[in-house]
């Protein structure tokens, strides 16, 4: 069989995958926190028709009596393949929404979320103490409060963060991650959610005006109009962001190649937060359209090679 036939088939398969990646990027151009992907091509095995030979003229180390210069190997490639599909972790543009619970990350890091609103996750040296498959990560910061005062994503997953150390110390208690629940955090910060409670030195206002600072601090207002820091959002950083695996809903999970997450409050060493904004997709439509044209023409060119091979084989059959 003609080698070019197999090469052309591999080329069509690879460009189809490339077009799949481009199509998904374009489909997610308006997805909050989406990171675009790109297909990386690599050649497949090559068939060696003749090997390379070293020079044998005088002055070389060869003892051969047949004097000649060096000859390079002759190889015919057997096609192409998709070697990797890499995610682009460049910053997307911030879009102002005016919603104080919308948060964009400026810099490195991801929000940590969990489907379990009752879980408290211990940390050792700012990392998970054990493997925890119920912690996911996202750049999408379109948060809201549910009926139970949990800070959640649109899919219902609860954002993770830190409690304050005590009622007299508003610094973050970084020994564990907790689901961000306003009522729970108020109690830990020395407040109470209703005036009839016998505990707490201040009472949360009926409209607490929850805000999130650039350092991740969560602030509420009490009945007297005073503000209190009741907790912090956590950011997770990774040794290799490209090793994270997409799981849908703009969320990612850790893999063996991403490394373990290191948690901390937003800072200059990770990223800072912009309240009242969300990070848009980093898809560049101009680049995607250009890649789509390349994929379309590459697919058509490989199809033409198959048509040419078909004509050659037909000619051989007619001469039999």
Image (cartoon, grey):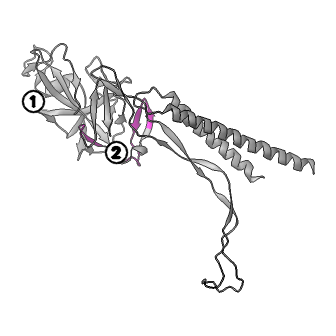
Would residue 99 be counted in the magenta stretch? no
Q: Quadrant of residue 183?
A: top left
Other residues around mark 2 within 10 Å, as few (<14) / some (14–19) / many (≥20): some
Considering the numbered disc 1 on the image, is that residue within a helix, a strand or a loop?
Answer: loop
Residue 310 image-quadrant placement:
top right
- Judging depth in this view, the residue of 86 and 90 nearest the camera is 90
Question: At which x and y percent is residue 151?
Answer: 28, 24
Determine whether, in the image, residue 52 is placed left or right of residue 35. right
Q: Residue at x 65, y 41 (%)?
A: 298
> Is residue 218 in sight in this rendering?
yes
Place of residue 59 in the rendered image (x, y in percent of width and height, measured from the top left): 61, 85
| Residue contact between numbered discs 1 and 2, judged by CB atoms under 8 Å | no
Which residue is denoted by mark 2 in the rendering?
A: 238
Q: Which residues are magenta?
A: 246-267
Camera-near label (1 vs 2) is 2
Mark 1 or mark 2, earlier in chain = 1
Q: Position of residue 164 (x, y in %)?
A: 15, 32
Q: CA distance from mark 1 to mark 2?
A: 32 Å
In the image, what residue occupies the spot 66% across and 38% down? 297
Residue 167, numbered circle: 1
Is 121 above or below relative to 218? below
Q: Is residue 228 left or right of residue 71?
A: left
Instruction: Please say whether residue 20 is visible from this viewpoint.
Output: no
Classed neighbour count for the residue bearing mark 1: other residues with Cα under 10 Å, few (<14), some (14–19), many (≥20): some
252 part of magenta stretch: yes
């Amino acid at each position: 069989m003609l080698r070019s036939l197999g090469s052309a088939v591999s080329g069509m398969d690879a460009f189809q995958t490339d077009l799949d990646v481009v199509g998904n990027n374009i489909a997610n151009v308006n997805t909050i926190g989406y990171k675009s992907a790109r297909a990386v091509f690599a050649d497949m095995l090559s068939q060696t028709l003749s090997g390379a030979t070293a020079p044998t003229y005088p002055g070389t180390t060869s003892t051969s009596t047949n004097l000649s210069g060096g000859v390079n190997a002759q190889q015919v490639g057997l096609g192409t393949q998709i070697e990797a599909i890499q995610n682009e972790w460049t910053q997307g543009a911030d879009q102002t929404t005016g919603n104080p619970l919308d948060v964009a990350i400026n810099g490195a890091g991801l929000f940590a979320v969990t489907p379990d609103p009752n879980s408290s996750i211990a940390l050792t040296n700012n990392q998970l103490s054990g493997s925890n498959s119920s912690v996911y990560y996202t750049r999408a910061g379109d948060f809201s409060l549910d009926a139970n005062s949990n800070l959640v994503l649109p899919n219902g997953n609860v954002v993770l963060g830190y409690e304050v150390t005590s009622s007299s110390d508003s610094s973050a208690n970084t020994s564990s991650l907790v689901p961000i629940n306003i009522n729970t955090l108020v109690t830990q910060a020395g407040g109470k959610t209703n005036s009839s409670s016998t505990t707490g030195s201040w009472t949360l206002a009926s409209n607490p005006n929850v805000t999130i600072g650039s350092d991740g601090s969560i602030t509420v207002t009490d009945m007297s109009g005073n503000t209190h820091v009741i907790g912090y959002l956590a950011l997770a950083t990774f040794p290799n962001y490209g090793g994270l695996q997409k799981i849908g809903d703009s969320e990612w999970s850790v893999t063996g190649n991403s490394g373990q997450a290191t948690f901390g409050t937003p800072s200059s060493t990770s990223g800072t937060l912009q309240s009242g904004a969300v990070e848009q997709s980093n898809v560049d439509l101009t680049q995607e359209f250009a890649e789509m044209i390349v994929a379309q023409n590459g697919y058509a060119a490989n199809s033409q090679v198959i048509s040419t091979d078909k004509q050659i084989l037909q000619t051989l059959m007619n001469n039999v």
